[in-house]
Amino acid sequence: MHTVLSAARALAAGLLLALVAACDRAPPAPGPAGGLEVEGGSLSFTAVQGQGVPPAPQTLAVRVDKDQAQRIGTGPALGETADWFAARIDGAPPDLKLVVSITRTTLPPGDYKARLEVATGDAQQNFLQSRPVELNYRVLLKP
């Protein structure tokens, strides 16, 4: 019996970076290896500057071929510097959920964009593939 994705909840941006670094190359183009699908490709949030409670978390469905992908992780895309969101993978393979939360409402009013990646790896921690998710965050001026 497979122990597929047994630590899926514990893996985050570190796995994404480790998978890419282990291969010592750029991520491969999307393809069948790893059988990774992320439903939708973007999420949008809105908050009033300084509001006490951030917007509700949002989810996207993630499906992975558990016979190929032994590890999955999510985190900011390489080079991404946005610090106003958090992301995690919930559930059990093959049907998982990407959960994205806003962590700050104190940003100056404006529109913010960020990109995160959902990535898979094999049992030897070789990078298989990744899917981008675009995040849009609008902070409104406090009335």
Image (cartoon, rainbow, N blue to C red):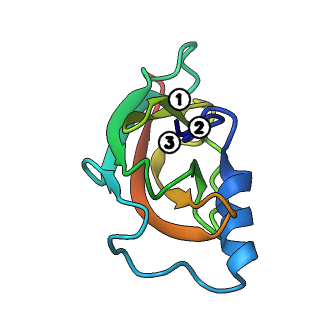
The numbered disc on residue 3 is 2
Which amino acid, mark 1? Gln
Residue 64, position as x, y percentages in the image: 38, 49
Q: Residue at x 47, y 65 (%)?
A: 130
With respect to residue 120, does 86 lie above or below?
above
Of labels 3 and 2, earlier in sequence is 2
Gap in Å between the C-alphas at discs 3 and 2? 46 Å
- The picture quadrant where one finds residue 46 is top left
The numbered disc on residue 64 is none
Q: Name the mark nearer the viewer: 3 or 2.
A: 2
Classify mark 1: helix, strand or loop: loop
Residue 33, position as x, y percentages in the image: 41, 70
Of labels 1 and 3, earlier in sequence is 1
Q: Residue at x 42, y 50 (%)?
A: 135
Question: Disc 3 designates what residue?
Answer: 109
Which amino acid, mark 2? Thr
Classify mark 2: helix, strand or loop: loop
Which amino acid, mark 3? Pro
Which residue is outermost to the bottom?
25
